[in-house]
Every structure is written in structure tokens, then in C-alpha cells.
Image (tube, rainbow, N blue to C red):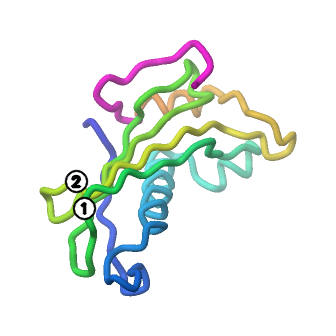
Amino acid sequence: MTYFSKQVEVRWSDLDPNFHLRHSVYYDFGAFMRTSFLIDLGITPQVFMQHHFGPIIFREECVFKKEIKFGDKVMVNASLVKARAGYSRWTIVHEIWINDDSLAAVLTIDGAWIDTVKRKLYEPEQFLIDAFDKVPKYKGFMFEEKPFQ
């Protein structure tokens, strides 16, 4: 497997006055995808609360390629592009496809984990490292030893 994948539904409320998907909904699709794959890996909201950590985003960028309209079949994929050894920081790319054949957008995020009590960056425990080892890797995936740019 090279990515996690989920189908999402375009709702009437997701449309803008031009009758295509509002720009912010693409970001919502990415958040839904990341939440879904974390839960699939066993990293649930309960785990976040029990271990006092959660994900944070440093950068989120979307490149729009084709418009999405009401009635389109939308599939969102996600995979790791790069990560720091131990997965303390990571970059995830999401590809948003319409009607099984057209790339509508590419959403890229740089993120990390935060200790929700200390409000400082969190170094993942082994269970989280083991879970992230299972995240599909994007073509050209690499571990970074230096700070992210």
C-alpha cells in the first residue's frame, strides 16, 4: 500500500457561490483523512488524552488543480513524504481525486506532536513510533536528521 484512502462526500453546504467546493473544505478533507488513519492505527482521541499529546500543524498548503462540484465522487489519499527519525516531526501529502481519474488538489502539511500539559514539542513513545512505521510512504520518502526547512 502506498497511501491511506477514504471516500468523502460533497455536501451542498460545502459549495461556494460558484457552485464548486469551497477552498476550506479541501483542508477539512485532509483533517478528516489524518484523523481516520490515526484511528485506524489505534491512535484515538482516548490515547491522546491518556498520554497527554496531540498533533500540531506548522504549515498547511493546498495546490488546486481541478474544481470539485456537487455530485463528484471524491477520494482522499494520504501518505508520509518525510519524517524525522522517531517521527517527532513529519510531512504528509494528501491527494484529492475526483471521479476515479482526475487529481483535483494536493494538500501538504508539516506537523509534529505537542505535549498537551507542558505545551512543548513531544517526543513520541515507542507505541507511536511503531504505529507511524505502518503509515504508507510516499514515493521518495526519506528520514530527515536535520531540522525541517
What's under tag 1, amino acid-wise? Lys
* Residue 7 lies in quadrant: bottom left
Q: Are marks 1 and 2 in contact (CB under 8 Å)?
A: yes
* Residue 137, magenta (yes or no): yes
What's under tag 2, amino acid-wise? Leu
- SS category of the residue bearing label 1: loop
> Residues in magenta?
135-149
* Residue 140 lies in quadrant: top left
Q: Residue furthest top?
A: 145
Q: Which quarter of the rendering shows the C terminus? A: top right
- Of residues 123 and 109, the one nearer the viewer is 109
In the rendered structure, the answer to whether residue 69 lies left or right of residue 145 reads left
Write down the residue under mark 2.
Answer: 103
Q: Residue at x 47, y 18 (%)?
A: 143
Mark sitting earlier along the chain (1/2):
1
Q: Residue at x 55, y 38 (%)?
A: 110
Q: Which quarter of the rendering shows the N terminus? A: top left
* Residue 129 lies in quadrant: top right
Residue 58, placed above or below residue 22: above
Label of residue 45 in the image: none
Residue 14, placed above or below residue 53: below
Q: Residue at x 45, y 27 (%)?
A: 82
Local packing at callout 1 (Cα closer than 10 Å; few below 14, some 14-19, many 20+) is: few
* Residue 141, magenta (yes or no): yes
Write down the residue under mark 1.
Answer: 66
Which x, y percent locates residue 75?
27, 60
Which x, y percent locates residue 81?
40, 31
